[in-house]
Amino acid sequence: PLSMAMSTVAIHIFGDVPSAPLVGVVQDNINNWRTTALILTTIFFPAAAIWFIGIFLHSVDRFDEDSEHQVPRVEGTNTAPLLEEKTGGTLPSQSQEC
């Protein structure tokens, strides 16, 4: 949750906050909405190319399920769920205090 919150804040700080002033500055200098929209839209092409290259780069998976250093699973455990009632045996006597 913390990393998702930080990612969302970073997206807003680096994307939403400067985008409106950037569009205004470009529009003031060019004074043509079609050209401004074309310039701002072409920014997506280098970003898409960088993303496309990035998905093919080799990365290290620290949580690889086929890793040699896994903790072995214990098949027969003697733990029981905490909220489940005991079905057999004797229950300890319960005393109610007033």
Image (cartoon, rainbow, N blue to C red):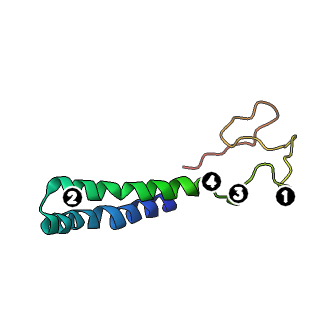
Sequence-first tag of 1 and 4 = 4
State the residue position of label 4. 56
**Which residue sits at x=44%, y=58%?**
47
**Horizontal relation, residue 30 to residue 11: left or right:** left
Viewer-side label of 1, 2? 2
Mark seen at residue 36: 2
Viewer-side label of 3, 4? 4
Sequence-first tag of 1 and 2 = 2
State the residue position of label 3. 61
**Which residue sits at x=74%, y=35%?**
86
**SS at mark 2?**
helix
Q: Quadrant of residue 59?
A: bottom right
Viewer-side label of 2, 3? 2
Q: Residues within 10 Å of mark 1 (few under 14, many from 20)?
A: few
Q: Give the Cα distance between marks 1 and 3.
A: 13 Å
Q: Quadrant of residue 14?
A: bottom left
Sequence-first tag of 4 and 2 = 2
The amino acid pointed to by label 3 is Asp
Residue 66 rendering spot, x and y as whole percentages: 80, 49
Viewer-side label of 1, 4? 4
Residue 5 rendering spot, x and y as whole percentages: 44, 60
**Horizontal relation, residue 8 to residue 75: left or right:** left
Q: Nearer the viewer, residue 42 or 90?
A: 42
Q: Residues within 10 Å of mark 3 (few under 14, many from 20)?
A: few
**SS at mark 1?**
loop
Residue 4 visible in the current orientation = yes
Sequence-first tag of 3 and 4 = 4
State the residue position of label 1. 69
Q: Nearer the viewer, residue 76 or 50?
A: 50
The amino acid pointed to by label 1 is His
Q: Residues within 10 Å of mark 4 (few under 14, many from 20)?
A: few
